[in-house]
Image (cartoon, rainbow, N blue to C red):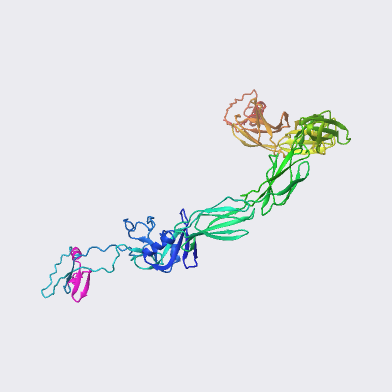
Amino acid sequence: MSLGMGKTGILFLIVCACCSSERQYFAQRNASTWEEARQHCQLCYKELVSLTSDNIQILAQNLNSDYWIGLRKYFNNSMFWSQWSNGDPMTFQNWYPGQPKLPKPQPKPMHTVNLGGFCSNFNITEHSYLQDDVCVIEVEEFCMNTTSVKTEYIPSESMLLSRTNFTEEEEMEVPENPCVSLLSSGLWFEKKCTDVLPYICYEDRFYGKVAISNVTLSSMTVSWMAGPGNIALYRVEVRGDIHLTENTTDLIMNFYNLTSGTKYRVQVFPVKCERDLNPQNVTFYTKPGSVRHLGVINVTMDSAFLSWVQPIGNHSFYKVKVNGHSSLATLNVTNEYIQIENLRPGQNYTFIVNAEVEDLSRTGDTDSTSAYTLPDKVRELTANEVTMDTIMLTWMPPEGSSCCYRVHVQQGKTRKILLNQTLVGTNLTVENLTAGTEFQLSVAARAGARPNDSVEGEAFTIMYYSKPSPVKNLILNSSNDCIMARWDPPDGNFDFYRLKLEQGNFIEATTNETFHTFQNLNSAVNYTVTIYTELMQKSRQSDGVSKWIFTLPIKPENLQVVNSTMQSISLEWDVPEKLQGSPVTYRVEFTAAFWNHIGRMEVQKNNVMLTGLKSGTSYKFDVKTLAGNLSSESISTSALTEPEKTTLVLMIQCSSETPLFCEEPNTADKIFEELNKIVKGKLEDQVYWRLEWKKK
């Protein structure tokens, strides 16, 4: 939304809110009746303004008096206050308080009664005093208000009572078909349509369209849309390297003597009531001229250098197109020369040049010339399927045309030529090579009708090594924290050995010897050792030779019993530092000699609970570390399950040939000691038992 003031003092306002067209508003200062205002708006604009909730506040902010708007009570037998003067339905109202005035009802009979203090005595509030002891009462309302009064009042004979019928006069006359003004506050107010006020007109912003046709090097035709309403004339302005203004009542105009390749701006102003409407605009270029003296100055295997003379008139840049090269895009340049790159060697090309204008709307006539490029190099020469004694060469044809290829192979250091062969295909396997040796491999494309009658382009050359041979007879040995590797050297050439030790992570080492020791390893871990022969340059590697081996396991530490019940015992032990972080398996064995109860269990943690044991029994426990098919020494301990106690009573009767022997004090102790030896000899410490002597 924007607001501005015209030269004639007309308020200019643009409002566009949720509408399909951009609406402009014009406040007119010349006071007129409502009908005169509407006629002027219809003649020079579109209509008196229609108000909405979107434009009312903006309009009111810029007004300082009352203005006619496009609203009156009735339009074309429509319902009152139902539509605007332009036919739009009225969906928004913003009346001044008390507006609009309702029609005055039919006069009611009124009475003037001289009742003295009658009105005040009856506490009648709906009355007015005309003079002393005279009040005016609407009888109908009085009766309604006194129906519930039980106290009867009878005026005295001395009261002067008189009654006169009359009709109540209107406070202000209400027009039958009033018009509406917009107050500076934005509120609406009824007024007589014959009152003279300033007013607000509106018009939808005109967006026409100018068309340009018949454009040549020096001429063009302009046509445009007719403006809305009563258009007096059209003012056509042309700006470019000339300034031209023409007035016309037609909708078309021709222009001549223009400059080729030049940008012109055309504006067509519809003039209505001496007011310029929104101009119809168009910008265009005349056609540029042709380039002159186009020629090819120089060519190489993949480029061509062109030059020319600029055309007469103006231009923005040149477009250069190359026929015979489908993947090469059109080139744009501003100079009168160009180096065209990435051409295909050995191919005939046609070069086409024309002048262009900046917006690409006009193209100059083309000029062309032709030339051949030189043969180019082959592409993507690679060595594939490299073995110890062969290298397979592959390549892609060069840009352009070629009939065949020459392959040249020589040993890197000695420069001994091993192969010089011409072929049609795009691959060749070079054989009988020495392992681990560098070779110079070259391929050159040849262009022509026949191999013997052709020209050769620049060769594509790569240096490549044959693959080294692998080591022989790899042997591994291990301790609990080391792995020792030995091997025999390979055939052919190499620079050093690369070793990889793998167990989760990689440990790498290089050596020139035929042995190596990996130290500070974890115990009981399966390690894989891989050995490669390798070349210093190009990092060529042989196939790897691999073997695996376990480091020797070491026994657990600090085995102890942490809990014991009648049927179970829980063990726990410490993991040695060399086993920390390794996926270790422990074997737990237990034995109860008395019952010949033997068991075994394997776990991956450093604790175990053994169940299903016999109560009151001594068990021996052995724990060892496993690594593949290897095992460490065991660590041992013993423990007794909790006994389930049972009392066994033995009664001993003493008899002796020696008189009074059984009564001697030491006899019973000797018998108990002997019995204790007998029981201990049978049970030892294999089960829980206790022998007590009790005299009867």
- Image quadrant containing the C terminus: top right
Q: Is residue 335 left or right of residue 76?
A: right
In the rendered view, tell whether residue 351 sits above or below residue 123.
above
Q: Which residues are magenta?
A: 118-144
Q: Nearer the viewer, residue 665 or 519?
A: 519
In percent of the image, x 17 and y 74: which residue is there? Answer: 116
In percent of the image, x 82 and y 39: which residue is there? Answer: 537
In the rendered view, tell whether residue 400 sits above or below residue 339.
above
Based on the picture, tell me whether residue 127 belongs to the magenta stretch: yes
Q: Quadrant of the rendered structure where residue 282 is?
A: bottom right
Q: Is residue 223 left or right of residue 685?
A: left
Q: Nearer the viewer, residue 349 or 437?
A: 349
Q: Nearer the viewer, residue 171 or 228?
A: 228
Q: Nearer the viewer, residue 492 or 270?
A: 270
In percent of the image, x 61 and y 58: which residue is there? Answer: 240
Q: Is residue 18 left or right of residue 333?
A: left
Q: Quadrant of the rendered structure where residue 456 is?
A: top right
In the rendered view, tell whether residue 458 sits above or below residue 269.
above
Q: Quadrant of the rendered structure where residue 256 is?
A: bottom right
Based on the picture, tell me whether residue 48 belongs to the magenta stretch: no
Query: Is residue 260 in view from this perspective?
Result: yes
In the rendered view, tell whether residue 497 sits above or below residue 84.
above
Query: Is residue 468 in view from this perspective?
Result: no
- Counting from the top left corner in percent of width and height, residue 377 is at 78, 38
- Counting from the top left corner in percent of width and height, residue 361 is at 61, 49
Q: Residue furthest top?
A: 657
- Counting from the top left corner in percent of width and height, residue 15 is at 47, 59
